[in-house]
Amino acid sequence: MIRILYVALLCFTSGVLLISCKVKDYPSDSRPVTHEQWDSLVKRHVTPAGWIDYRGFQRDSNRLKAYLDLLSRHHPNDEFWSREERLAYWINAYNSFTVKLVIDHYPVESIKDIKRGISFVNTVWDIKFIDIEERTYDLNNIEHGIIRPKFDEPRIHFALNCAAKSCPKLRNEAYTAERLDEQLTEQAEYFLQETSKNVIQPGQLKLSKIFNWYKGDFTDNGTLIEYIDQYTKVDIQPDAGIEYLDYSWALNDLPEGE
């Protein structure tokens, strides 16, 4: 019995999927929602470079709660929601609930410092605090149980923000169905040009560990270099060397006073 429990827990370690743990579809008759509330919040409290003013979000906690309540009343479904509406919803949900989790425990030096339960068993991504209609999720459920297996869209790795300095930036506008493809492409291009996270040279790539952790997502239709080459202006050599940079889990907090 202990071994079965241990294997189940191996589905997620430190927020990285090890074994596929797809979330079953949830029956709902909800209609698509708009994300103006989240758009307004991130425009106010997130810089263009993606630094997050968590103190500002705390002051605006009632407005954030109103948006999260909206999400909680509307679970996406295949019947009434388009693919783009569902994916935009889940990206915005992941990002906004992550901010909620941080401000509920703020100040913290790292999102990984947030723990509930036994530390050996639980990580911050396993905390079940996201109520949507009659189902409760954790952040792992949303990323690895819904977004990755159901949408087959590698660019989501540049859109989901894990509240750490080495994560892709939190976009200071909401994702919308109408502009989703454009927004995801912009995120990919921006992430690859951030030299603190990726250094792209013709013969040598120093990459974020995201490209190592989720390599299979990026190489379904070719090599990793071929995937990256779509989103950078650098003419990368096919045999370029690849190494992975250290990953900082320090909070992507806007310094006080800025």
Image (spheres, rainbow, N blue to C red):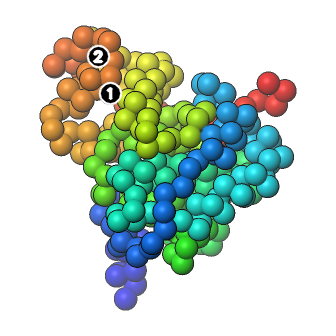
Decide which of 145, 67 is in the foreground and name it: 67
Q: Where is residue 114 in the image (x, y as percent from the top left)?
A: 66, 57
Q: How far apart are the two marked residues, 2 and 1, measured between alpha carbons?
A: 8 Å
**Amino acid residing under circle 1:** Glu
Q: Where is residue 31 in the image (x, y as percent from the top left)?
A: 48, 63
- Mark drawn on residue 47: none
The answer to whether 34 is drawn above or below residue 29 in the figure is: above
Residue behind mark 1: 243
For this view, does 208 lie left or right of residue 121? left
Decide which of 214, 158 is in the foreground and name it: 158
Q: Where is residue 155 in the image (x, y as percent from the top left)?
A: 36, 38
In terms of sequence position, does the residue under pointer 2 or pointer 1 come before the other?
Answer: 2
Residue 242 seen in render: no
For this view, does 157 lie left or right of residue 239? right
For this view, does 181 lie left or right of residue 15? left
Residue behind mark 2: 204
Decide which of 205, 93 is in the foreground and name it: 93
State the residue at coordinates (27%, 45%): 217
State the residue at coordinates (56%, 50%): 34
Q: Where is residue 196 in the image (x, y as percent from the top left)?
A: 51, 22
